[in-house]
Amino acid sequence: MTILRYEESGWEKLSDLIFRRHVHGSRVTIAQFKLLKGSVVKPHSHPHEQVSIVVNGRAKFVVGDETYIVNPGDVVHIPPNVMHGVEAIEDSLIVDVYSPVRDDWIRGDDKYLRS
């Protein structure tokens, strides 16, 4: 069993407005994203199924041809290989669950998140 204590691990700064902390299991990756107002995660796709849970704040998700304004408690499901992106309307905390494991992050192939 692994316990990641977020208060001890700190946040990885991906840009001036985007911060991440995550843990990999054998079949899933779970991440917290702190998206400050005005931050943009550029449109991208990946072979991982993604479920995003809005903990606080408001954000605009574009998934395929659809646009959603999400609020605390909302859940967004993003199927594998579907283009998607997000813009923070307010400072937001979003929990993402991915399956399978984000091996691209392990390799450092996450340039779309970095400035």
Image (tube, rainbow, N blue to C red):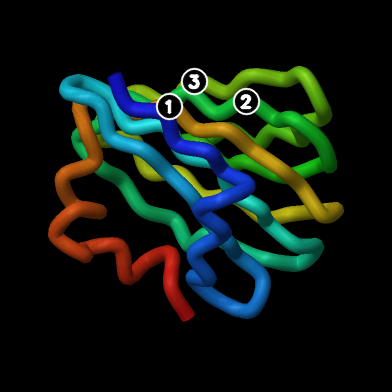
Residue 10 is situated, as x and y percent measured from the top left of the image, at: 56, 58
Inspect the image, locate mark 3, and give the three-letter code of the amino acid beneath it. Answer: His
Q: Answer with left or right where residue 70 lies relative to residue 78.
A: right
Callout 2 touching callout 1 (CB < 8 Å): yes
The label on residue 77 is 3
Camera-side mark, 3 or 1: 1
Find disc 2 in the rendering and name its residue.
Answer: 53
- Report the amino acid beneath label 1: Val
**The N terminus: image quadrant:** top left
Residue at 41% of width from left, 29% of height from top? 3
Q: Is residue 94 left or right of residue 96?
A: right
Inter-mark Cα distance, 3 to 2: 9 Å
Amino acid type of the residue that numbered disc 2 sits on in the rendered structure: Ile
Viewer can see residue 99 = no
Residue closer to the observer: 105 or 24: 24
Residue 69 place in picture, x, y as percent: 77, 35
